[in-house]
Image (cartoon, helix red, strand yellow):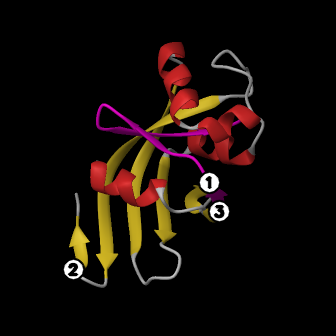
């Protein structure tokens, strides 16, 4: 996971693509973290993206590194986790989230674990590399 995380943590924003009723939707995200080789993103249950990931957990993340032609495409399955120590860890690793959520008990704070099913990284040095 580290190559995926290393790329995404330095890109702002990256885009999370979801689908609802076969209608594609993409939204900018600014926080991702890696804990024990797993990737996590956060959102609010009040947002449409939350509802879409619950209904159809298949997501794609895309990003391009500013000033380069380096890009990444990650396909994953997003599963909500309610584990409070894990949610607290996500908040500590992504301090930008503290601007939006009080703590891990905040009812508006939801964390999704991403099970990556495929990933491609394209860099000018290496071309397209399949990571998974």
Alpha-carbon span between mark 3 and mark 1: 13 Å
Residue 103 coordinates in the image, percent (x, y)? 68, 20
Is residue 130 magenta-colored? Answer: no
Q: Secondary structure at mark 3?
A: strand
Mark 2 or mark 3: name the one nearer the start of the chain: 3
Tag 3 residue: 25
Tag 2 residue: 126
For the residues bearing labels 2 and 1, Cβ distance under 8 angstroms? no
Q: Magenta segment, which residues?
A: 27-44
- Picture quadrant where residue 46 is located: top right
For the residues bearing labels 2 and 3, Cβ distance under 8 angstroms? no
Q: Residue at x 75, y 42 (%)?
A: 47
Q: Quadrant of the C terminus?
A: bottom left
Q: Is residue 79 rendered to the left or right of residue 74?
A: right
Residue 20 coordinates in the image, percent (x, y)? 63, 54
Q: Residue at x 58, y 29 (%)?
A: 91
Residue 125 coordinates in the image, percent (x, y)? 24, 82
Alpha-carbon span between mark 2 and mark 3: 30 Å
Mark 2 or mark 1: name the one nearer the start of the chain: 1
Tell me: residue 66, above or below residue 22. Answer: below
Tag 1 residue: 29
Q: Residue at x 48, y 73 (%)?
A: 65
Q: Is residue 60 rendered to the left or right of residue 25?
A: left
Of the pair 110 and 126, the residue shown nearer to us? 126
């Amino acid at each position: 996971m580290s190559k995926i995380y290393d790329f995404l943590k330095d890109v702002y924003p990256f885009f999370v693509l979801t689908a609802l009723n076969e209608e594609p939707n993409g939204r900018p995200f600014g926080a991702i973290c890696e804990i024990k080789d797993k990737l996590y993103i956060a959102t609010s249950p009040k947002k449409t993206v939350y509802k879409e990931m619950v209904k159809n957990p298949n997501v794609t993340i895309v990003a391009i590194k500013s000033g380069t032609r380096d890009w990444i495409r990650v396909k994953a399955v997003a599963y909500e986790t309610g584990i409070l120590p894990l949610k607290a860890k996500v908040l500590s690793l992504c301090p930008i989230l503290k601007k939006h959520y009080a703590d891990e008990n905040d009812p508006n704070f939801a964390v999704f674990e991403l099970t990556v099913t495929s990933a491609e990284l394209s860099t000018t040095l290496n071309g397209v590399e399949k990571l998974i």
